[in-house]
DNA sequence: TTCACGCGTGAATCCCGCA
DNA sequence: GTGCGGGATTCACGCGTGA
């Protein structure tokens, strides 16, 4: 068990909190107390059933997912595995806890049907639209440009699950957060590489995706369990966002990489993490996307063009000034004593000593999105 | 049976072509010949499991799907129904036919798992992103802004299914069509209304969605069956796009509305329907033809684009390098140390001091052949 | 210092006709 | 059915290199 607990941890917290547990997730979850977990994020094997090698048009070979842990003898074997871990997960979930499972068309239908059979109550299916997916090299299908996440409560009757509706809405330019989310795949500096320069894990998920999952359906201080921890994206984002995590993973290489990674994560300030709560006052790239993708770091100070007013960016995509938090538009209006304000053209960030209006940053994201649009 | 056949129909075509068959889709499909349908589009009941009435914030009542045909006693009952109609559908599908099924998170996971169990081979899941979805009025979930379509072939081994890759790519600004499609929901003038001004069918799909389905995976003249015909969107779009249809529907009201609707549809001109097709559709021209016609003289030296490798053309249409002679493709692969190579785009000839790819010479031959055929 | 360009790569169920 | 071989097929982004 890799212990990554902070010195500030409450002494009464269980010894498995903020650790990586080595082993098979079914038996390890069985060893945890029932009704102890606030939220679960699971990225199980997809059972890809790939055929032979695949080459790009330039004859380079695609580095496919051919790991032993993704191999199953049959649909029945995959179903049995899925049923077992979902049952174990359901036992440790609090009555009002929720679970997220991510998958592709290879496995997600089996997972979803089994979740319904076991009594989970589906709340949403959420589509992760990839802004830069791998092409279909042979031109025989549509480009597989998304993955699917299922979000479910433990029971149909569980009505008090956590959903930070107002925070999501405020983060999405004051309209409801939709069930289709656009994010790039995990690449570049975020992608963990081994000493050989090769990716440590074949299916590392982007932190921005996990950030929205965690911000939408958990509260600071909650405990999030990931039964297929891999290289610990769930743990890293949970720690950064002031949540506790529990990871379960079988492979030593992954555990080691995850432990190093999480150790270097610095949790955000409590003030930045404070959630928007209650009914908001009245009033299309969401500002949250800029935060989730890292274009604007949480905690960044925003100012108007003349530097007369300041606000601070929070992790959920709202901003705060004078003790109040809301969308970029609302806070922009508030500090000026006006009824309305276009936050996109009002607020600026300081870059290299210069002010840059955030509308320019939105344009960057829009350009990315235009490539993916219809 | 509502007969909507055009006078121009070939007399030898079966009597059920371009008609709406009244009755239960399982027994009606059983009465059709096996291996007779090119494509199926199915919009089965979603098994919505709604609780009580839902009201908007202004207290107006949401007109939900509460029809008898959407009620099932249990998941098991829904599964049995799904299995039955999918089995019947699979029997009438041609070996290289494909099937589309649309659903929401309430039912699509069960449908997808059963499709896999029955031997269908999933090709893509395609997300219909709604540009104007209904909001989540209670603010307890993400806005349910999409539906999911599964596209599958009859068997894993069926490789020759229709996919109009080049047409889709051209329609999408010359980049591959992705698995997420953005369309508005069916409303306004397209939405069929009864004499009372009330919508005729609760789940009428937009014609644009069906158009992309049909254009991507069928050819003009193909036969498309819809076992849950409703108000006939599939039939209307199929007719407009020069395809044949077969509809099966139980409710007289829907059949009547669909028949009227389809009668008023005017098929598009063949010229408009002609599909973009890439090199795959071009006649095969052996490299030997270029030598035989004198476009490339025996003894000519071929090089790659950067002049790193050379080969010499032989009179029989093979080329030689490093003491070996074989096709332009084999030698191209050999000199590079690869398994495969497209010799047409790899090899160049020197003309007036410039390099010219031999694929251009092939195009000259193809143009000559086309001119001669007129 | 900046820009242009080449190269590598990502959860992939990825060919088809003829003998 | 199997085997063989022609030849068709890629999008976005990060990084390194060289001018």
Image (cartoon, coloured by chain):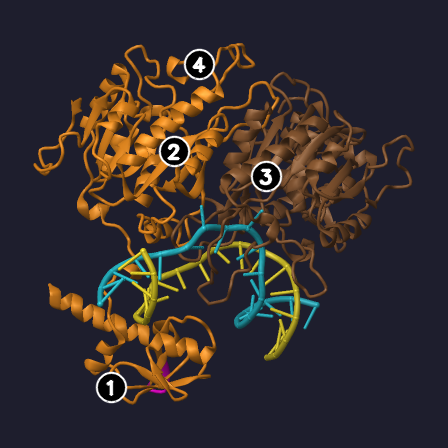
Chain colours: A brown, B orange, C cyan, D yellow
Q: Earlier in the sequence, mark 2 or mark 4?
A: 4
Chain ID of residue with mark 2: B
Q: CA distance from mark 2 to mark 1?
A: 55 Å
Q: Earlier in the sequence, mark 4 or mark 1?
A: 4
**Rendering coords of residue B218 (x, y %):** 28, 43
Q: Is residue A210 left or right of residue B367?
A: right
Q: Which residue: 25% across, 31% down?
A: B236
Between residue A353 and residue B354, name the one nearer to us.
Answer: B354
Give the image quarter of residue A303: top right
**Rendering coords of residue A66 (x, y %):** 56, 55
Give the image quarter of residue B138: top right
Secondary element type, mark 4 = loop
Residue B299 on the magenta segment = no
Q: CA distance from mark 1 to mark 3?
A: 58 Å
Q: Are marks 2 and 1 in contact (CB under 8 Å)?
A: no
Q: CA distance from mark 4 to mark 3?
A: 32 Å
Residue position for label 4? B63
Between residue B306 and residue B155, name the one nearer to us.
Answer: B155
Residue position for label 1? B315
**Rendering coords of residue B26 (x, y %):** 30, 25
Q: CA distance from mark 4 to mark 1?
A: 76 Å
Q: Are marks 1 and 3 in contact (CB under 8 Å)?
A: no
For residue B310, above or below residue A79: below
Residue position for label 2? B101
Tell me which secondary structure the magenta stretch mostly adopts.
strand
Q: Earlier in the sequence, mark 2 or mark 1?
A: 2
Q: Residues within 10 Å of mark 1 (few under 14, many from 20)?
A: some
Residue position for label 3? A102
Chain ID of residue with mark 4: B
Region in magenta: B351-355
Q: Does residue B207 appear in this view?
A: no
């Amino acid at each position: 068990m890799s212990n990554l607990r902070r010195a500030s941890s409450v002494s009464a917290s269980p010894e498995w909190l903020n650790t990586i547990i080595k082993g098979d997730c079914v038996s390890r979850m069985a060893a945890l107390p029932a009704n102890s977990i606030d939220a679960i994020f699971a990225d199980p094997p997809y059972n890809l059933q790939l055929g032979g090698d695949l080459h790009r048009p330039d004859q380079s070979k695609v580095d496919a997912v051919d790991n032993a842990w993704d191999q199953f003898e049959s649909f029945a074997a995959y179903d049995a595995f899925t049923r077992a871990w979902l049952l174990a997960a359901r036992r440790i979930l609090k009555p009002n806890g929720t679970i997220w499972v991510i998958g592709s068309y290879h496995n997600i239908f089996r997972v979803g049907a089994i979740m319904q059979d076991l009594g989970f109550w589906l709340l949403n299916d959420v589509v992760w639209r990839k802004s830069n997916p791998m092409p279909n090299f042979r031109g025989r299908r549509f480009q597989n440009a998304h993955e699917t996440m299922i979000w479910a409560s433990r029971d149909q009757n569980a009505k008090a699950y956590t959903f930070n509706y107002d925070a999501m809405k405020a983060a999405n330019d004051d309209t409801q957060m939709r069930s289709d989310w656009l994010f790039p795949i995990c690449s570049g500096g975020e992608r963990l590489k081994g000493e050989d320069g090769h990716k440590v894990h074949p299916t590392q998920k982007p932190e921005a995706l996990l950030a929205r999952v965690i911000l939408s359906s958990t509260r600071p201080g909650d405990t999030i369990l990931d039964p297929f921890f891999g290289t610990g994206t769930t743990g890293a984002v949970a720690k950064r966002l002031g949540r506790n995590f529990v990871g379960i993973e079988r492979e030593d290489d992954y555990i080691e990489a995850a432990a190093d990674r999480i150790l270097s994560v610095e949790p955000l300030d409590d003030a930045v993490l404070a959630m928007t709560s209650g009914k908001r006052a009245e009033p299309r790239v969401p500002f949250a996307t800029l935060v989730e993708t890292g274009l604007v770091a949480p905690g960044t100070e925003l100012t108007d063009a003349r530097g007369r007013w300041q606000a601070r960016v929070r992790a959920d995509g709202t901003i705060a000034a004078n003790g109040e938090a809301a969308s970029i538009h609302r806070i922009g209006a508030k500090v000026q004593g006006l009824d309305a304000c276009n936050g996109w053209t009002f607020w600026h960030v300081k870059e290299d000593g210069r002010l840059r209006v955030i509308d320019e940053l939105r344009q960057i994201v829009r350009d990315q999105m235009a490539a993916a649009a219809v």
